[in-house]
Image (cartoon, rainbow, N blue to C red):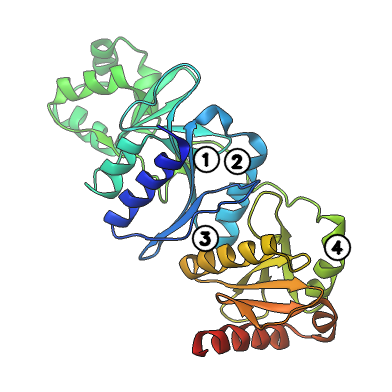
Amino acid sequence: MSRSALVGNVTAMLEDADFVVSDRCAIRPKSFDIAARRGDDLLLVKILGNIDAFNRATGHEMQRLGTYLHATPLVIGLRSRDEDLKPDVVYFRHGVPVFSPDTAYNLFIEGVPPLIYAAPGGLYVNIDGDLLADERENRDWSLGRLANELGVSRRTVSKYEDGMNASIEVAMALEELFTSELTSPVDVLEGAEDIHESDSTPEDPAADPDDEEVVAVLSKAGYSVHPTLRSPFKAISEDQDDGDNEVVLTGHSEFTKAAEKRARIMSSIGQVTRTHSVYVVDRAKRDAVDGTALVERDELEDLREADDLRDVIRDRAEREEVA
């Protein structure tokens, strides 16, 4: 299957699951392909035939974007170098959860989350430690008795009851012993970071030298600016003085056909992520592109306060909608 067809299939699946899906980020480089929202759940999705193409730099950028946009970054892929991705198994690459289209279908269409995740050493599941302890005590079994039944140490059983996860083999043995479900699903949308021990959000990269002046002006106006390297926008700017902590997708370049394309993609992403977007250009003959406000560089320098820039962005986007 071609990558384009795979992106189309994943997009259609998410739409069938009642997600609102952005236009595809048909530009390079790109850290994610689509943004998708269903209620309060916001996804930034990278779609790959071979997940080995997902590198550390892209993973770190997706983590940063997830933090600033309050979204879950994830990769949907078919295979790795060694094998096809197993159904209903969550993998991790550079701090981002990865799973197959079948797993995505089960999660988003059928409402059945995966139970298994891959980690160094094999496949594991979450054990409900409190329930395990209750089941053991109901049988009047000691830690040692259960340890003998499982062929592990008493200390290991104690760790299971304290919340340590178990291999699939141990989980199956436990459920056979107690004839009850002791596992809990992997919460991909909210709890994956509890399973995967990753560092905190990676630090922002330095701004492109061509963008430093724009970043400086935005910062002076009261925005916290987070540069990006592999996104349709050059930065995510947060107006932290605003009570709603307003987020603005920010672009900057000469206004060319390529810039117009980026501005349209930014607008589509902004509609899904519920953010505004602005594109700073040297000269503009229009107010906006599909809801992305156009602001000339000289004009931006005159906007001394975040409130002023916010009003310009909203006014131009609204004027285009009316037109």
Disc 4 marks a residue whose amino acid type is Glu
Percent across and percent down for residue 85 are 39, 26
Residue under circle 3?
70
Residue under circle 1?
96
Q: Earlier in the sequence, mark 2 or mark 4?
A: 2
Residue under circle 4?
212
Disc 2 marks a residue whose amino acid type is Gly
Image disc number at residue 115 = none
Percent across and percent down for residue 117 are 39, 30
Query: Does residue 236 appear in the picture of this structure?
Result: no
Mark 1 to mark 3 CA distance (whole Å):
14 Å
Mark 2–mark 4 CB contact (< 8 Å): no
Mark 1–mark 3 CB contact (< 8 Å): no
Percent across and percent down for residue 139 are 14, 26
Q: Earlier in the sequence, mark 1 or mark 2?
A: 2
What is the number of callouts on the image?
4
Q: Residues within 10 Å of mark 2 (few under 14, many from 20)?
A: many
Q: Is residue 134 left or right of residue 47?
A: left
Q: Give the foreground label among 2 and 4.
A: 4
Q: Nearer the viewer, residue 170 or 13?
A: 13
Q: Earlier in the sequence, mark 1 or mark 3?
A: 3
Rendered residue at 71%/83% (across/down): 309
Q: Earlier in the sequence, mark 3 or mark 2?
A: 2
Q: Secondary structure at mark 2?
A: helix
Q: Quadrant of the N terminus?
A: top left
Q: Earlier in the sequence, mark 3 or mark 4?
A: 3
282, above or below 135, in the image: below
Q: Nearer the viewer, residue 113 or 153?
A: 113
Mark 3 to mark 2 CA distance (whole Å):
16 Å
Rendered residue at 35%/38% (across/down): 101
